Image (cartoon, rainbow, N blue to C red):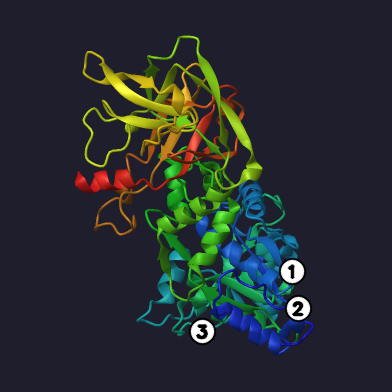
Amino acid sequence: MSADLPTPEPNPESRSLHFIEEILEADRAAGKHGGRVLTRFPPEPNGYLHIGHAKSICLNFGLAKAYGGATNLRFDDTNPVKEDVEYVDSIREDVQWLGFQWKGEHYASDYFPFLYDYAEYLIQQGRAYVCDLSEAEIREYRGNFHVPGKNSPYRDRSPEENLDLFRRMKAGEFPDGSRVLRAKIGMASGNMNMRDPLMYRIRRAHHHRTGDAWCIYPMYDYAHGVSDAIETITHSVCTLEFSDHRPLYDWFLEQDVEGRFFQRPLPRQIEFARLNLTYTVMSKRRLLQLVQDGVVRGWDDPRMPTICGLRRRGCTPEAVRAFAERVGVAKRDMVADVGLLEFCIREDLEKRAPRRMAVLRPLKVVITNMAEGDAFEVEVANHPDDPSMGTRKLPFTRELFIDQDDFRAEAPKKWFRLAPGAEVRLRGACLVTCKDVIKDASGAVVELRCEWDPASRGGNAPDGRKVKGTLHWVSAAHAVKAEVRLYEALFTQEDPMAVAEGQDWKTLLNPGSLETLAEARLEPSLALAQPGERFQFERTGYFAVDPDSQPGRPIFNRTVGLKDSWAKLEARIG
């Protein structure tokens, strides 16, 4: 490698280069493209980006950065029927949130005049023709994997006639769907994509950027490679489903035999395996259906695999980037375990999330040997391993709330939480012993009567007795009432698309994917928490403030839970 070329940034985990890095290394060693690297991320603005797109974003931007290059953001806006400015804006926001900045922002529509001129050139070279077959007839003439296609009866029109018809298509003389422009390659090709593919169709639709200036629009397979070449992209990194399209990508560019249109060397398309996630669907069409059917509250519902959904749930961009790195780059389609994503989120939030106390399912505790007006403050660390986060003071009063899950009227073995006669530590405050249990008419426990050891202030007994259980708590008089939303997987089956014949994939939706707790009680400092802020609720999990929050009435989304050894043990016993 030339000494003046930047070397890839070191990976935090020692590993060998993946196959795309090997290609870039070889190209740079050969001096191809002058050693430069320019990638692109080219989403179609017809929906919101999801975790699979995040993997592609991280790869394209990461490769360019590692090799001292840059990445373009290009919107593939060649289908005005499905595209919208809303999606353009959301894509910009998602890419920036992930921590990346593009070199140039481009649109396929920027190149409509160029694409049209190059199409005319291909017609003049006898490499494209106007076809009058209907959509159904084109499908029939194409054949299948076992039967070769047959030529369109319009295939042998002269370049002059094709050029005239194409210009009249552009002028709007023909109705939608009546004619298309096709590449003239060969109907016997074993690759179906090469059987005289469509280049242009007539479609009178208002475009979000060009308005009504055009009534013909280029097809993706034509526009994509040409757009890459216009921008002098060096490496066009895309997902594996485009591997069969690569010969067509190359064909369109290689027809510029005189070098009039494109700079050499031409871009190189490289395919990698797309990312799928367990208990999740990634299809934009199916995600849109979930939104339209009201299964979820919108594209940014925290149960959705969209980037905006992950952001609303409380996921950090650092966690997504770490996940993309751990998944790696492969040549075969793969399914990543959602547990790996949760691990990356938990690992990141463990370091950055300040601790707070929150009782999700309140159970009242009255300390009977404390006077009515007695109270004191408890000082606790905001992070046990990061002194720079400081401390905060919490009010401790006679009446408290603990979580219902921390009490058992009949304690099983190895139960170190509260039970009749049991002594526990209230985090940072003192030791208390349960003396009495108050139940309502239905037999449900509604209040615990406890006694505290005044000598144990701070949480430890002066006589050195050992107390294993430590509970979180909040003062009843000072607690902030909040709504807490607990999210689980959206589907009950690891692969929601692996349904039996005739079965609707939506029957696999998890009815318990959202549980809303309307009576949670939080420590006073959380009253001022702002949307997007993240916290660890001690002994419970990581939570983020939802945008729906109102002053004095916060709403929290559970991002990911903590490991709970007792819950796992209890599940096995049950």
Which residue is labeled 3 in the image? 186
Mark 3 closeness class: few <14, some 14–19, many ≥20 residues within 10 Å? some
Q: CA distance from mark 3 to mark 1?
A: 25 Å
The local secondary structure at tag 1 comes to: helix
Going from N to C along the chain, the mark reached first, 2 or 1, is 1
Residue that lies at the very extreme toward the bottom in this rendered image: 30
Q: Amino acid at mark 3?
A: Gly
Of residues 145 and 476, the one nearer the viewer is 476
Rendered view: 22 above or below 165: below
Locate residue 91, reporting x and y percent: 62, 52
Q: CA distance from mark 3 to mark 2?
A: 24 Å
For the residues bearing labels 2 and 1, Cβ distance under 8 angstroms: yes
Locate residue 24, reporting x and y percent: 64, 81
Of residues 426 and 344, the one nearer the viewer is 426
Q: Amino acid at mark 1?
A: Phe
Mark 2 closeness class: few <14, some 14–19, many ≥20 residues within 10 Å? some
Rendered view: 62 above or below 492: below
Locate residue 475, reporting x and y percent: 48, 21
Of residues 549 and 406, the one nearer the viewer is 406
Residue at position x 57%, y 79% in the image: 17
Which residue is labeled 1 in the image? 114
Q: Nearer the viewer, mark 3 or mark 1?
A: 1
